[in-house]
Image (spheres, rainbow, N blue to C red):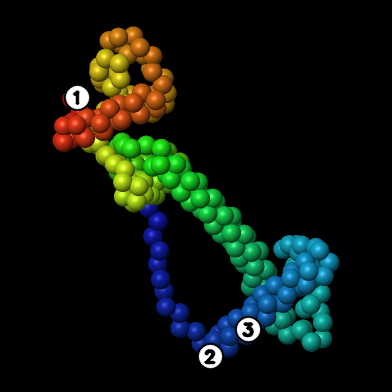
Amino acid sequence: MKTSKAYRFRFYPTAEQAQLLSRTFGCVRYVYNWALKAKTDAYYNEGKRLYYKDLSAKLTILKQQPGTVWLNEVSSVALQQELRHLERDKARVKVAKIHAKIADRRQDFLHKLTTRLIRENQVISLESLQVKNRIQNHHLAKSIADVGWGELVRQLEYKATWYERTVVKIDKFYPSSKRCYDCGHIVSKMPLHIRKWTCPECGETHDRDINAAQNILAAGLAVLACGEDVRPGR
């Protein structure tokens, strides 16, 4: 397994090096603020967006001005890198806003969905899914996180108390996908890529998700009727 290691070293600069570093940091801060103002002014005054290439050209001109010629006293690499940092900072803010908007829409959808489900049903049966364990599967992690399973269950449970409904959780090992709803036969394997399958015992063809949902509902009703968990194979 490939691993990455990080090493930290303490730097003891000489007096001359410390002075150069201090001057460089000051120039870098100046360039960052100057570039940010240039981008803001260009957008609000001219409706233009300035990117790294535009700012780099303007920085060359800035370094030739009498009042800012001191920018030439430090490495140009540090100044150019700060322009790239500004570009990434703007991108990070933009991405963060997009993710916040997606999260708000997901939350709104979940609230509407769970409220409708609770209002329209007396009993809701769920699998006791171990979301944390499933997220460890790299092929499923993004999809599971996107749908918000944990939040869906949380909302169903507390809204059920508001509306005096019942939420039943069945055993996490119950073979809801592998069990034929019509005859009860359980197949040995059911890989995720199989979305439709035919029962070898009774010949009935099932949609994987619909068949699992029917089994989960039946198991949940059995739990309510019997007062005990429905174990695999029962």
Q: Amino acid at mark 3?
A: Gly
Q: Amino acid at mark 1?
A: Gly
**Relative side of 26 to 212, left or right:** right
- Residue 80 shows in the view: yes
Where in the figure is residue 58, as x and y percent of width and height?
79, 71
Secondary structure category for the residue under label 2: helix
Q: Earlier in the sequence, mark 3 or mark 1?
A: 3
Where is residue 4, by image quadrant?
A: bottom left
**Relative side of 51 to 126, left or right:** right
Q: Where is mark 2, residue-wise?
A: 15
Residue 27 sits above or below residue 220 on the image: below
Q: How many marks?
A: 3
What's the distance in space between the residues labelled 2 and 1, CA to CA?
77 Å
Q: Where is mark 1, residue-wise?
A: 233
Q: Earlier in the sequence, mark 2 or mark 1?
A: 2
Which residue lies at the image location 16% right of the left edge and 36% below the top edge? 227
Q: Earlier in the sequence, mark 2 or mark 3?
A: 2
Q: Nearer the viewer, residue 31 or 192?
A: 192
Which residue lies at the image location 56% right of the left edge and 59% below the top edge? 96
